[in-house]
Image (cartoon, rainbow, N blue to C red):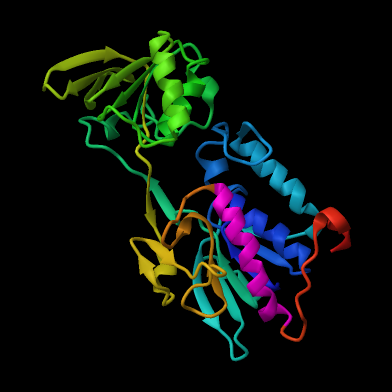
Amino acid sequence: MITTDICIIGAGPVGLFTVFEAGLLKMRCHLIDALPQIGGQLSEIYPQKPIYDIPGYPEIKAQELIDRLMEQIDPFEPGFTLGERVEELEKQADGSYIVRTNEGTAVHCQVVAIAGGLGCFEPRKPEIEGLEDFEGKGVAYMVKQPELFRDKNIVLAGGGDSALDWTIYLADVAKKVTLVHRGDTFRGAPDSAEKVFELAKEGKINLVLQSNVLSISGKEHIESITLVGKDKEEKTLATDYLIPLFGLSPKLGPLANWGLSIDKSAIEVNTFDYSTNVERIFAIGDINTYPGKLKLILCGFHEAALMVQSAFKFVYPDQKLSFKYTTVYGVNAF
């Protein structure tokens, strides 16, 4: 059995940063993730996607952020169990927990930190005729290798941050980029939306608003799509790829059976320390919810920093927490 202080469920950016904050307080961490690699959604879904809201980085690729986080936590030597899904939680007489995976791995810990992003997730699939028939044949729900689209005609559909960010990025990669959105305003960051409108104005992308993708046509590979506008008029666009970006459908999986307070597939927490209604279980990052919640990596980092302060009393009940600044003492002093 693996023994640690904090068992972190989820090895995405927030889970990784938790290792750093816990390490500063001399708490050991072991991370469990159902994905086969470290990095969560950033590594699995969009490793080359640019991220713009990490302090100190005007722009950083998703995988690079994960690599930097791994470098940051290396001195604290965390443990990892990858490719296994957490199934059971057993509370012990002393208040500690044993976390068990579907492969039988057992982790004994004093505190559980759920940093599972959106939990078990799958892409939301719009109602498009022939969509599933062309999966792997020109239909992709994520961009893992941008070079795949080099000098190709691509159509992206959606109105959120991912659709905007990838439109901006792929404008310099693809032969032709078309962004289709059912509205005339975007849900994503205003700055990104402004850049997309500017690209369209300059003729670098094709922006089709108040329209939906109706159907897909082709033989062995996608050849064209049919759009329908607000006026019900249909038109056909030739394309090599269609990338629908309508977000992810979250599912908590076995976590939903742990007695946690759940609201719309998210775990309710106390914003004092991001504790759940179950003692010694905390939830940080996109998997939690509270009034004013923002699903930003930056906010998850903040939540992790506060969470470990409260976790300390369960790991070291006889010690008084003395907070120190890394700028004064350096990481190696902790």
Instruction: State the image coordinates of residue 155 (x, y, percent, origin top left).
Output: 35, 21
Instruction: From the viewer's side, name the closer residue of 296 and 94.
Output: 296
Magenta segment: does it hold 302?
Answer: yes
Q: Is residue 331 above or below residue 314?
A: above
Instruction: State the image coordinates of residue 81 (x, y, percent, origin top left).
Output: 63, 60
**Does residue 82 appear in this view?**
no
- Occupied quadrant, residue 11: bottom right
Say left or right for 212 vs 311: left
Instruction: From the viewer's side, name the closer residue of 328 and 182.
Output: 328
**Does residue 118 appear in this view?**
yes
Magenta segment: does it hold 262?
Answer: no
Query: Residue drawn 78% across and 69% down?
Result: 26
Query: Residue drawn 65% across and 78% down?
Result: 110
Q: Is residue 223 above or below residue 67?
A: above
The quarter of the picture where the C terminus appears is bottom right
Instruction: State the image coordinates of residue 21 (x, y, percent, origin top left).
Output: 71, 60
Q: Which residues are magenta?
A: 297-316
Q: Main secondary structure of the magenta part?
A: helix
Query: Residue drawn 48% across and 22% down?
Result: 168
Instruction: State the image coordinates of residue 61 (x, y, percent, origin top left).
Output: 61, 33
Say left or right for 276 vs 14: left
Q: In the rendered picture of this protein, how many numbered marks are placed on residues? A: 0
Say left or right for 155 vs 317: left
